[in-house]
């Protein structure tokens, strides 16, 4: 995973994820959905992230928009063909 800018900052951000199977091989054909949420304020971002598969198991996420400083949680839901969806979440603070 890589984030631009690093660390995440107020306003527009991008994320690149590489999905690998248990043997380290790239996972192709996944559908990802990404939700940003600010738990301390009980709301998300008004901008919906866009996910673009790039090949080699890499998925780029653009339009990650954080309108205000504070604690944010990003949940990525990964749906592979013929498998149950899996959620991965991480949290970070945006400086004011």
Image: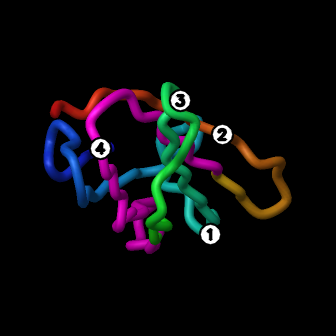
Q: Which mark is residue 68?
A: 4
**How far across and down, in percent of the image, does residue 75 sit?**
56, 42
Mark 4, other Cα within 10 Å: few <14 / some 14–19 / many ≥20: some
- Residue 54 magenta: yes
Q: In this picture, is 91 found above or below 58? A: above
Instruction: Measure how far apart labels 1 and 2 are at the Cα level.
Output: 16 Å
Residue drawn where x is 70% and y is 42% of the image: 86
Report if the CB atoms under discs 4 and 3 are less than 8 Å apart.
no
**Earlier residue among tags 4 and 3:** 3
Residue drawn where x is 62% and y is 63% of the image: 30
Q: Which residue is mark 3?
A: 39
Instruction: Measure how far apart labels 3 and 1 are at the Cα level.
Output: 31 Å
Mark 1, other Cα within 10 Å: few <14 / some 14–19 / many ≥20: few
The mark lying in front, picked from 3 and 1, is: 3
Report whether 36 appears left or right of 42: left
Report whether 76 appears left or right of 95: right
For the C terminus, the quadrant is top left
**How far across and down, in percent of the image, does residue 14 sit?**
28, 58
**How far across and down, in percent of the image, does residue 33 sit?**
60, 59
The mark lying in front, picked from 3 and 2, is: 3
């Amino acid at each position: 995973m890589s984030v631009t800018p690093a660390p995440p900052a107020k306003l527009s951000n991008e994320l690149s994820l590489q999905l690998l199977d248990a043997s380290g091989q790239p996972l192709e054909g996944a559908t990802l959905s990404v939700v940003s949420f600010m738990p301390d304020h009980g709301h998300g971002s008004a901008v919906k992230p866009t996910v673009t598969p790039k090949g080699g198991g890499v998925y780029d996420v653009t339009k990650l928009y954080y309108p205000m400083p504070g604690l944010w949680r990003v949940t990525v839901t990964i749906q592979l063909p013929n498998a149950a969806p899996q959620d991965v979440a991480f949290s970070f603070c945006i400086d004011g």
